[in-house]
């Protein structure tokens, strides 16, 4: 069994792991984008709700309704804080997944380089063996020609 064949299973496994890690990194990136979009929606909703408060106060709003309005704005603020924490966690997970993907990609590149070097060395060895065989046949042909003379 050639050296490259012995390591080929390992390389194949790394290729699969690299594809899996790439997919995980893409999913993590997607989760960050979705979390940021959700934050933007919450912040836009809070702005709209706050601007609506000014209109309601100008139009006259009852005390309990104003209290409920402020309580709802407070809950929106809490949701925004929580969403920022979600974003931070998603970004941390994304960084971890991307780092693992890069590590596996580096390993795969190194193993592939070794396999390619081994293939190149094997081609050189095969070329030398072929050249020796050609030289040997030529030598035998010369000896046969000189023996006939």
Image (cartoon, grey):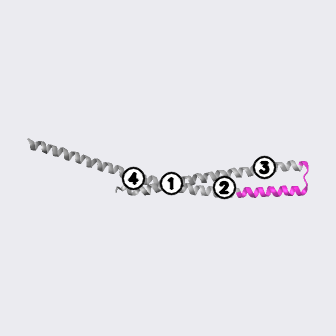
Residue 36: which disc? none
Give the residue pinned by disc 4.
Answer: 115
Residue 88 located left or right of residue 134: right
The nearer-to-camera label among 4 and 2 is 4
Number of callouts = 4
Q: CA distance from mark 4 to mark 2?
A: 41 Å
Q: Residue at x 39, y 53 (%)?
A: 115
Mark 2, other Cα within 10 Å: few <14 / some 14–19 / many ≥20: many
Q: Residue at x 76, y 56 (%)?
A: 77
Give the residue pinned by disc 3.
Answer: 47
Q: Position of residue 132 (x, y in %)?
A: 23, 48
Label 3: which secondary element = helix
Q: Earlier in the sequence, mark 3 or mark 2?
A: 3
Q: CA distance from mark 1 to mark 3?
A: 43 Å
Q: CA distance from mark 1 to mark 2?
A: 25 Å
Residue 87: which disc? 2
Label 4: which secondary element = helix
Residue 125 located left or right of residue 65: left
Q: Residue at x 42, y 52 (%)?
A: 112
Mark 1, other Cα within 10 Å: few <14 / some 14–19 / many ≥20: many
Q: Earlier in the sequence, mark 4 or mark 2?
A: 2
Q: Earlier in the sequence, mark 1 or mark 2?
A: 1
The nearer-to-camera label among 4 and 3 is 4
The nearer-to-camera label among 1 and 3 is 1
Q: Residue at x 74, y 52 (%)?
A: 42
Q: Earlier in the sequence, mark 4 or mark 3?
A: 3
Magenta highlight on residue 94? no
141 shown above or below 5: above
Q: CA distance from mark 4 to mark 3?
A: 59 Å
Give the residue pinned by disc 1.
Answer: 18
């Amino acid at each position: 069994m050639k050296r490259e064949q012995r390591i080929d299973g390992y390389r194949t496994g790394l290729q699969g792991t690299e594809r899996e890690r790439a997919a995980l990194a893409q999913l993590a990136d997607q989760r960050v984008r979705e979390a940021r979009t959700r934050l933007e929606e919450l912040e836009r909703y809070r702005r709209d709700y706050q601007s609506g408060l000014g209109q309601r106060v100008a139009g006259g709003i009852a005390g309990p309704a104003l209290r409920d309005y402020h309580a709802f704005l407070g809950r929106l603020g809490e949701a925004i804080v929580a969403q920022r924490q979600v974003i931070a966690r998603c970004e941390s997970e994304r960084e971890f997944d991307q780092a693992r993907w890069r590590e596996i990609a580096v390993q795969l590149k190194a193993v592939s380089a070794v396999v390619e070097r081994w293939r190149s060395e094997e081609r050189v060895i095969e070329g030398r063996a072929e050249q020796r065989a050609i030289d040997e046949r030529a030598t035998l042909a010369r000896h046969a020609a000189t023996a006939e003379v």
